[in-house]
Image (cartoon, grey):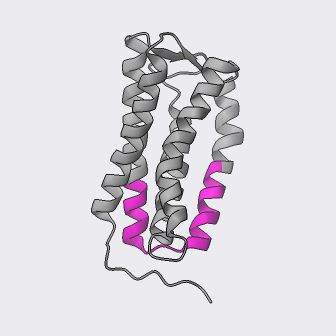
Amino acid sequence: MEMQLYILHVIPFVILVYLVFLLFIRPPRAVLLASLLGGLTIGIINALADLLAYYAHWWHYSIDGLTFHLPLPFYLTPILVYGGIVYLLIWRLWRGRRHWLALLLLVGIPLFGFVRDLFGSAISHSTYLTWDSFLAGPLDFLLWLLMFYAGFLVFRRLAPTDLVVQHPK
């Protein structure tokens, strides 16, 4: 039941936020597809790591409606937000006055993801993620670094670099 409520209430909001960002960023098709493939890379690595963590007893999810011990709808947020939106923002800000903000996103998003998992799982016990081992924290940190920068590598390889960013006047 909890997963159905998540699908009903959260996923439409995530998609709406993604579409609003697309409306304002207006990336070319090649950059949009590269950001989606980078985000898909994040989602796949995240799902595979969660599956490995479940069978290795590092962490697990305690929510109804899991598919093969994975909360599949949860992976839409890393795909569209941490991948799609963040990579598009980095692309938009990279060659402008706000280059520092692109660098902040590159460093800050993996740190934010880890701190969110740490606070929700180990400190406040307020998320569906439950850490089962003392290795969960360091492995979660490495997972965030691996999946975010692997997705960014896919994005940078596929996104054309010769496009000039035109800022609206």
Furthest residue to the bottom? 169
Q: Is residue 22 magenta?
A: yes
The residue drawn where x is 45% and y is 31% is 141
Residue 158 is at least partly visible in this image: yes
Residue 89 is at least partly visible in this image: no
Q: Identify the magenta region.
A: 14-37
The residue drawn where x is 39% and y is 62% is 33
Q: Percent position (x, y) of residue 125?
A: 68, 18
The residue drawn where x is 69% and y is 39% is 8
- Compare residues 82 and 118 and report the one nearer the observer: 118
Q: Does the magenta stretch include residue 150?
A: no
Furthest residue to the left? 157
Quarter of the N terminus within the rendering: top right
Left or right side of 67 for 11: right
Query: With respect to residue 124, does 102 lie above or below?
Result: below
Q: Percent position (x, y) of residue 54?
A: 43, 15
